[in-house]
């Protein structure tokens, strides 16, 4: 099971609602990978720092790559730093890998040959698994989806997790996404002010 792949599929599903930002999704995918590594015993969290555990036995190449990128020297990396480092362009990496594996396909949004393309999940066992987890409102998947603005239909109350490490990762994802949004808003304000300056009175 790959929480990151399931999250990517849910984010790509052509359902009504705003598109998920690629930066937001990349941060959440990095969090999903870390949660899966924790679940597999390949990492633990101590005082908000990621401590590598046993070797990863995952046959998922992106998850195995994530395990290899864990900082093994002390002091270990903080969760937030991991999200930003591992999450850099991670949504594009998942898109490329899943396209290569036939898990997602490209479709044009119109009949014209120059219409913009969109990525949609293919009808595969991976998509059906992701859909089943989504329909069950699996807490981790729902919480990560919520962080990137996907409504799971749950109540506004945050779900509880049995594992404190998972709780810490989900909270860090929410914080990182909010920080990214704050950066976007600041840039918008700066760009508007710059445009007004050149426009003059």
Image (cartoon, rainbow, N blue to C red):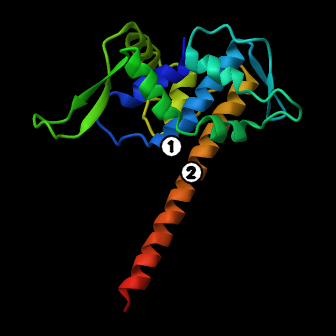
Q: Is residue 156 visible?
A: no
Q: Is residue 74 visible?
A: yes
Quarter-wise, where is residue 122 in the image? top left
The residue at the point 36 percent across, 41 percent down is 19
Disc 1 is placed on an element classified as helix
Question: Does residue 75 appear to the left or right of 126 in the view shown?
Answer: right
Q: Where does the image place residue 43, in percent across and percent down from the top left? A: 76, 20
Q: Which residue is tagged 1? A: 23
Q: Residue furthest toward the bottom?
A: 201
Numbered circle sitting on residue 180: 2
Disc 2 is placed on an element classified as helix
Quarter-wise, where is residue 132 in the image? top left
Numbered circle sitting on residue 43: none
Quarter of the image that includes the N terminus? top right
Q: Where does the image place residue 97, in percent across and percent down from the top left? A: 45, 22
Q: Where does the image place residue 52, in percent across and percent down from the top left? A: 79, 21
Question: Does residue 7 appear to the left or right of 175 in the view shown?
Answer: left
Question: Does residue 47 appear to the left or right of 160 in the view shown?
Answer: right
Image: 142 above or below 191: above
The residue at the point 29 percent across, 36 percent down is 16
Neighbor class of circle 2 (other Cα within 10 Å; few <14, some 14-19, many 20+) is some
The residue at the point 59 percent across, 36 percent down is 87
Label 2 and label 1: CA atoms lie apart by 8 Å
Check if mark 2's residue and mark 1's residue have beta carbons within 8 Å: yes
């Amino acid at each position: 099971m790959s929480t990151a792949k399931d999250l990517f599929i849910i984010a790509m599903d052509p359902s009504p609602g705003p598109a998920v930002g690629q930066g937001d999704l990349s941060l959440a995918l990095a969090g999903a990978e870390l949660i899966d590594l924790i679940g597999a015993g390949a990492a633990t969290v101590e005082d908000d720092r990621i401590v590598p555990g046993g070797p990863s036995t995952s046959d998922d190449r992106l998850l195995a790559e994530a395990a290899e990128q864990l900082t093994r020297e002390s002091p270990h990396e903080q969760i937030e730093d991991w999200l930003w480092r591992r999450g850099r362009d991670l949504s594009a990496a998942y898109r490329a890998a899943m396209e290569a594996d036939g898990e997602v396909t490209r479709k044009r949004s119109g009949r014209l040959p120059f219409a913009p393309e969109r990525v949609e999940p293919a009808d595969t066992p991976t998509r059906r698994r992701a859909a089943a987890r989504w329909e069950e409102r699996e807490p981790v998947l729902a919480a990560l989806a919520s962080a990137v603005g996907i409504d799971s239909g749950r109540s506004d109350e945050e779900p509880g997790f049995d594992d404190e490490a998972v709780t810490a990762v989900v909270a860090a994802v929410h914080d990182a996404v909010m920080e990214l949004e704050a950066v976007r808003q600041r840039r918008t304000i700066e760009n508007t002010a710059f445009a007004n300056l050149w426009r003059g009175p």
